[in-house]
Amino acid sequence: MNDLVKVMIDDREVEVPKGTGLVETAASAGIEIPVFCYEPRLGAPIGACRMCLVEVEGLPNLQAGCTLTAQDGMVVKTAASSEKAAEGQNATLEFILVNHPLDCPVCDKGGECPLQDLTFRYGPGNTRMSFPKITLEKPIPVSPLIALDRERCILCYRCTRFSSDVAEDNQLVARNRGSHTEISTFESDPYRAPFSGNVIELCPVGALTSTQYRFEARPWEIQNVPTICGLCPVGCNVNATVREGKVKRILSRNHPEVDGGWLCDKGRFTYPHLTAEDRITEPLVRGGLGLEPVGWDAALDRAEELLRGADTRIVTALSGSESVEQAYALARLLRVGLGAHTAVLPEPTSAALDAFRLPLSSIAAAEIIVIVGDDDVADRAPVVDLWLRAARRNGSEIVHYGPTGTEYTDPGGAAAALQAITASGNALGGRLRSAERVILIWSGDGGGGGARLAETAHALGLEGKPGSGAFHLPATPNGRGVAIAWAAAADEDESSPEPIGLLIVSGDEAAANPAVRALAERAENVIAITMFHGLAVGWADLVLPATGSLESDGTLLNLEGRLQRLRRTVIAPVPDELAWLSNLAGRFDVELSPHAAVVFDELSESAFGGVDGSGLSGAAPLAARTPYEAPAPAPAAEDRAAAPPHSADEHFLSELRLLRYRPLFSGPFVERIGELAFQRPTAEIELSTEDATRRAIMTGDTVGVRSNGTSVELRARINRGLMAGVARVADEHASDLHLHVEVVKL
Amino acid sequence: MSSLGLYDEIQVIRERYPESLSAVMPALQLAQERNGGWLPEEAFREVADALDLTPAYCLSIASFYDMFRLEPVGEHLIEVCTNISCGLNGAQQVVEAFESELGVRAGETTDTFSLRTVECLGGCGWATIVAVNNRHRLNVQAEDVPEIVAELRGTGRGEE
Amino acid sequence: MTPSTPEIVFAGTNGGALTEIADYQAVGGFEALVKSRALTPDEVIAELNASNLRGRGGGFFPTGRKWSFVPKPDEIDSPHYLVINADESEPGTFKDREIMLRVPFRFLEGCLIAAHAIESRHVFVYIRGEYEAEFDVLVSALEQMRAKDLLGDVTIVLHRGAGAYICGEETALLESLEGRRGLPRTKPPFPATAGLYASPTAVNNVESITSTTTVMEIGGAEYAKLGVENSTGTRVFSLSGNVVSGGNYELPHGFPLRDLIYDLGGGIADGRSLKAVIPGGSSTVILTAGEADRVTLDFDSLVGAGSAIGSAAVIALDDRCCMVQLAVRVSQFYEHESCGKCTPCRVGTKWLTSILQKIEDGRGTQADMDLLVSVADRINGKCLCPLGDSDAIAVMSYFDKFRDEFQAHVDEGGCPFHGTSSLDHLLAPVAMHVHNEAVAHA
Ligand SMILES: Cc1cc2nc3c(=O)[nH]c(=O)nc-3n(C[C@H](O)[C@H](O)[C@H](O)COP(=O)(O)O)c2cc1C
Ligand code: SF4
Ligand code: FES
């Protein structure tokens, strides 16, 4: 524990740990030191805006309070008690306002603007600037998502520091010098990076605004509803800004252990999918003319009919984006009501990992981090990528085994890599055993991720080490919660019915999943529970409208193993799943409450050791670690998951191993947001320098990619971080290319 | 300029520094030299690629310093110091002499000439200082200007 | 350039240049290095302390003290760096360039001595981008030294600036050298503990380092006998403005300002009379002719007169110079060079310029005179680094000492010089930008 020091601020004595920032020290005494550029999450203070000027005993000049830390015996006077400091702050505000337009009434920030507030409290009544203010072209697009009003910009450099020091994308920068300094991207390039939207929230004035939110609402007309982002397994804490029953914007609701106050652009900007044109608002049944709307009673009668018709020959495909309660309700209906135990569940995350639980934030403090897997962390669990960057800045060593990693391993080689580390005599393994804080991360599909990870963590003895642990990055937001809920509903084993009488497709991820589509071929009937027409047409016999995660109460289990409370932020245009599920369940003599809270209490005991649901709102806690139980050993097949290594002459035959990946900006929601189109991957194929050179291919060339039967044309890009013998292509551009492809310059 | 050439030369510069970011200024200086005295969009992309930076970052650096040029410059760059000591010794007359001799105003560019005024060039004791393609001429008076211009009209870049 | 005695920095040049290593060795070159390398780092620092050599870059901080703040290698495991500030850009200053041109080896020898003193093996010379000839001379000198194996295990990297006055400020210089925009850092931490790449770093001016060679050659005690108390040794003064023979003059500290102007400088040109003197570069407080008559060129005397020795750049202004025009031009310089990081400087310098321009144009009112004072006061002492403050301090010194002239502009509704002032309509780069935009929009 840090030793305490006494500081005197405005004749109030405070005691804080030595080195505490002066701004925080003052705050702890209930004294405000106003700031603009100061934002601890952006790294060391820069002392640029000079809003925080204070008088420090013994120093002739005013000091930037934000750059000072508490020292024993320090005597500080803020504007509250020092004429000089007050004059200094007034001066700073006058300088800032010299070029700031007085358009607050039409400014999105108006009413929630620090500059407006501080001017009111510390500022000059009027400006003495008799010269024309700098006028600039405004607003200019920084990207299709973000608009920049340079006249309003006060050059606090928060946005550029986020870009360079937090996300490290270096896309948004300051250009020119002195009074000509301005925030800018490169020429006409958009700010294209996974976390760009955070700069909107960081901007202390209305200079950077959301193009989706512009002029949509005024602060006094809105309400911020706290909930969880349901789009990936991180489960960032968010506030949904709601006006007249519509979600107008998504803001971060800083959970220091989970998201550190950052959001990815997928979580921030996809909310308009709730009002997508092809949103399904009433049940549909297949008739002569394709899908036709029917009333709810008719729909539920039809559902009952299909269920009875198929009796137990039912397969349920779940998305992993359902809330725990929705999955449980479905399971109760089907498993208890009909004895239909067969389900296609999202990829499992081993329970054995609970012995190695820890908050995501501890990544930033790790000594050594080992990542295995084929996927970029940012594509599977975006905010984890920010924690990793923080770790690197803090000096952590990060080793990544994968085709794009620091240590090249063939695609699918994650499990093998872990085995190698734990093998006796492995150098890294040795260091991991002796290191204080070690974190393992599995970032890829297959290979029994969670289980293999748990075994490795156990072999390295991590359960005993506080700052150490392991994270499996699943492909779906609540896959594990869904699996647990499904299991909690009944314990009979599943059979695999053939032929399938009825396939129930729950959720849009499942509906968009080719594997599930394949199952449908073998099914007599299909019930699809989905939000969008696009996903229902052509294969469903009955379509039941789904709600989005912003529209329902419930609970999600994130990749840490943290239960978090989902809140209904707006009323869905369709009835809640739980409502009609409990109705249907009733028809099969299964009692099921339509209220999420009640459902949770019911399943909590069997599924989550009786956690009290009411404790999951706010900043939800992470459950304690459980004792380690060895998971089921890997089936022989999985060890062979790694592709046979390529031999050099095989290269010469120009056979490349195709590495498909699922980009962060993909999926049914993203596809429905026009403003996000520019973030989606271009139709390109990434090649290693070696493979490109051998084929005389340069970045920008058009190449033909062939595997027996199929052929596509893609733009080539040399990726210096990619291992030779592997070609990387986004799923949506790989059509149905096979595992090995030929790449030729066209 | 073959982009490969620049790429490799920048790797050499990179070796001089403990951290490769330090190479960004010399790399931009080299790129500017290779691109006729200014930095077109493509130059930024090449430098960024060679140093694993973004073009935006390189632009933020280049635009901070006066000697990086973001628009084309004439074959001959004429810079007249108009800071205190040169000002006291007739710098403004020198500027005006160049303006009338070249038919451009300070800050403008023809394809042959770029004329600018600059801050103290560090030759105050020998005012007025005029930098012609970065080479300093001392004790320049308004009446010397026609001769200088004539001389430059007769030569190509750097030949003088 | 008039030779002047005693020569320390320029010793052995006889008004010429020592750019061939043989010539330099002929006048005892590199003996100081041999001597120093035979001593422990602490012994070298002790010599520097005995000499009381103080920084020639403007800060006047004791060089030996600065080096003693750099932690010893056993106290910290990151490498040590010596960074030479050769970014000379303070208006009126042009001494470092002549040192590099005429005694490059004495300068580089000093680098090696300093590197030995702080136990560094990495030296970076950040040289002003506009100094091409100087850069070439250093390149050739380094070649010759390598050929003679004088560098030992020390590497000296020449890093060229690209035109930004602020990069003369040591922390901005370090940022720039690291490949960032030249924005000053907040202190602490100071470079000595966390400088280049967050490692222990000594930043020294070219002349300070070159003088180090002499200190080690003749010994600290001998050196301390030159000059006056608190300001020992010689200084290369850059004389410019309305004098007959401007140039660099190496003189012992304590030399009378008037003798520099009238004896060495040949007095005021065109038979005009002296009006004022800027004694230490544009950032220092101006002296009236009367004040200039009384001061000597050393730290205490100039501080006593309310100014500073700064970069030892003496600018003489004759009676043709309009003080408001001077203020406009100086403020334009700081506006142009403001890095833009902190608000008071970025906004304030530009605002000051426009108020001054308004007064010069005869549009100024009494209220503008008060506003001028108030805005200057709101900049001064509020900035992150001294650049912004310097603008306010310099301009205010013109205002305070030549208030009547400012007043006349307001009362007569125009410049009392009616176009005869030597700085009349001087086109500054900042003004040029504006005029460009005008052209662009037209
Ligand atoms: C705005 C500003 C500009 C400066 N310019 C220079 C310069 O051009 N050359 C220089 O040596 N020092 C300059 N300095 C002083 C440096 O910050 C630093 O004090 C000096 O280089 C230390 O070397 P010294 O102790 O040997 O003098 C400047 C300081 C400021 C605030
Ligand atoms: S005072 Fe001027 S130069 Fe110094 S940090 Fe502030 S803006 Fe930059
Ligand atoms: S908050 Fe301290 S300088 Fe900006």
Image: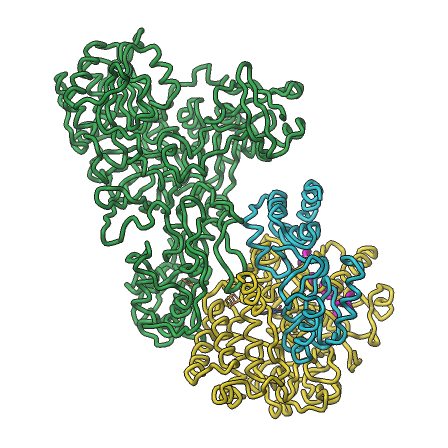
Chain colours: A green, B cyan, C yellow
Q: Can the viewer see residue A232 in this picture?
A: no
In what quadrant of the picture does the C terminus of chain A appear? top right
Q: Which residues are magenta?
A: C99-122
Front one among A477 and C217: A477
Query: Image quarter for residue C261?
Result: bottom right
Q: Position of residue A449 (x, y in %)?
A: 42, 25
Residue drawn 61% across the image and 80% down it: C424
Front one among A294 and C204: A294
Q: How many marks?
A: 0
Query: Image quarter for residue A651?
Result: top right
Query: Image quarter for residue A534?
Result: top left
| Residue C398 higher or lower than A308, as above or below | below
Magenta region includes residue A488: no
Magenta region includes residue C100: yes
Front one among A458 and A325: A325
Q: Position of residue A512 (x, y in %)?
A: 36, 24
Please indicate whether residue C116 sits to the left or right of residue C193 in the image.
right
| Residue C170 higher or lower than A727, as above or below | below
Please indicate whether residue B104 sits to the left or right of residue A404 in the image.
right
Residue drawn 77% across the image and 60% down it: C136
Q: Main secondary structure of the magenta part?
A: helix
Q: Residue furthest top?
A: A498
Residue drawn 82% across the image and 70% down it: C17
Q: Position of residue C32 (x, y in %)?
A: 77, 68
| Residue C227 higher or lower than A126, as above or below | below
Please indicate whether residue A178 sits to the left or right of residue A100 in the image.
right
Q: Can the viewer see residue A367 in this picture?
A: yes
Q: Position of residue C203 (x, y in %)?
A: 62, 64
Q: Ligand 3 is located in which of the four quadrants?
A: bottom left
